Image: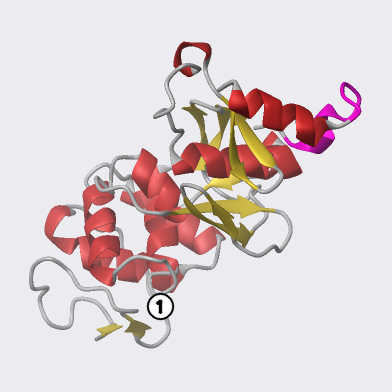
Amino acid sequence: MVRPRDLAGLYVNPTAELARLEKQGAVRQAARGYYVLVPAQWVTDSSWRPSLEAVALGVAIADYGVDQVALMGLSAARLHGALPRAVAAASAAVPKQRPPLGTRWGQIFFHTRDIAPLDLERVETVLGAGYQTTVEQTVLDLARWADAWSISGEMIAEAITSLAGRADWSLVRDLAVAQRNRAAYVRALWVAYPVVSKRPDLRVRGPVESLGLRPSQPVPAGLFPVEL
């Protein structure tokens, strides 16, 4: 990811230079002020496009640095293979509040978070390397903001269930406690109940809202304090 300001020391008019490079196929403008470098083997192919997740991570790293940002939520679920259908929205954790950014490939939503307490792993994209939330952290995040993502509750429930079989639920529980997301843990476990054999217990005070989620199969009454 390249911004005109990054080239200020090389060119008198970086924006004009990037426009020239775009005509040659060397870069693509992702959004106002952001350009992606096209891999050499794709320079002559006008159909090449990076994934929206790669663009989101590239923008976040360009603006805040690789150690301050991470892909999360929908983007992490997508890269973990839990959302088989591409969505025109990406999610990145960044250190400062900022509005969504519209790109030529979709909308990027920024979530103000300190990534230090999050469970992260390295991820490689066509635009470079950075961090994304692990399967366990992604499960917790999807359930925590289930009614705030830009896709349906049914798709969120499918993503949680898809990740559930790979998750270490003891770790999910520990993350929930450390991050004060007990309700999110209960909600995620309730949704994923049909595919989770070992379910570490975690008590919560009062009922937990479903936030529009539902398990794919009926859950025994009274097993979880979730209100529909």
From the image, which quarter does the C terminus lie in?
bottom left
- Give the color scheme: rainbow, by chain, secondary structure or one colour: secondary structure
Which residue is at the front of the view, 204 or 87? Answer: 87
Q: Residue at x 50, y 36 (%)?
A: 54
Q: Is residue 46 left or right of residue 228?
A: right
Q: Residue at x 26, y 41 (%)?
A: 166
Q: Residue at x 71, y 38 (%)?
A: 62
**What amino acid does circle 1 point to?**
Val
Q: Is residue 21 left or right of residue 145?
A: right
Name the spot of residue 132 as percent of width and height, x first: 51, 41
Name the spot of residue 175 as percent of width and height, x first: 48, 55
Task: Indicate yes or no whether the magenta region holds residue 136.
Answer: no
User: Please, what is the dominant secondary structure of the magenta stretch?
Assistant: loop
Q: Is residue 38 above or below residue 138?
A: above
**Quarter holding residue 212:** bottom left
Q: Residues within 10 Å of mark 1 (few under 14, many from 20)?
A: some
Which residue is at the front of the view, 36 or 219? Answer: 36
Report how many numbered discs are placed on residues in the image.
1
Q: Residue at x 46, y 47 (%)?
A: 105
Task: Indicate yes or no whether the magenta region holds residue 9.
Answer: yes
Identify residue for label 1.
Answer: 204
Q: Which residues are magenta?
A: 3-12
Q: Secondary structure at mark 1?
A: loop
Does the rendering let one see residue 171?
no
Does the rendering let one see residue 76?
yes
Name the spot of residue 89 as percent of width and height, x first: 44, 56
Which residue is at the front of the view, 130 or 10? Answer: 10
